[in-house]
Image (tube, rainbow, N blue to C red):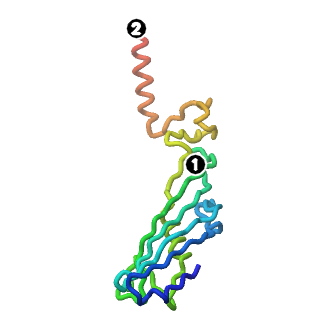
Amino acid sequence: MRFNLQDIIHTPGVSKDFTYELDLSGVSLFGEKPFNRPVKISGTVRNMAGALQLKGEARTVLDTRCDRCLKPVTVDMFVPVETLLAEELEDEENDEIYLLEDGGIELDEVFSTACILALDGKHLCKEDCKGLCPTCGKDLNEGPCNCGKELDPRLAVLAKLLDKDSQDQDEEA
């Protein structure tokens, strides 16, 4: 959404509110499309002594999967956004200031970037999710599987020592 700010650029103390819905349903991350619902955007741009400050927030519910057991999970997402807007930049490498184009700003760019960067790296159905058995794929939250404990090949020599010690103790008894 293009947000025209020409009427407040040169008037200190004035502000302008915005509210709209952002569609991020086309965003695909790691083979999933977590933004199946609209992202509700709201905020204000305020001229503070000639500097434009954008304060806003994005709210939505993500539809994703548990990273351990793959069950569907819905996660509430709240992203606060606060940035400065400028007609020209003195420092070209400043990522925290958005450049106005023809007296306006593309709010979609500001908020879609903020939402994607705010995504958690891990989503769990519950904090103590046990995940899936790596051998048979059974959901371990529903109970143990029938697979035997697979021994790490790097520890096989130690396991033989433990077996030998237990055999020696049995012979002594």
Q: Nearer the viewer, residue 110 or 64?
A: 110
**Residue 173 lies in what quarter of the image?**
top left
Q: Residue at x 63, y 59 (%)?
A: 32
Total labels: the figure holds 2
Callout 2 environment at 10 Å: few (<14), some (14 to 19), or many (20+)?
A: few
Q: Which mark is residue 76?
A: none
Which residue lies under the disc numbered 2? 173
Mark 1 highlights which residue? 66
What element does badge 1 sit on?
loop
Above or below, comparing residue 5 to residue 70 in the picture = below
Q: Is residue 129 left or right of residue 33?
A: left
Question: Could you tell whether 33 is left or right of 17 in the image?
Answer: right
Q: Earlier in the sequence, mark 1 or mark 2?
A: 1
Judge by depth and name the residue closer to the eye, 29 or 21.
Answer: 21
Q: Give percent across and percent down for residue 13.
A: 39, 81
Q: What's the distance in space between the residues labelled 1 and 2, CA to CA?
A: 50 Å
Camera-side residue of 88 and 52: 52
Looking at the picture, which amino acid does disc 1 mark?
A: Cys
Q: Amino acid at mark 2?
A: Ala
Q: Marks 2 and 1: in contact by CB < 8 Å?
A: no
Quarter of the image that includes the N terminus: bottom right
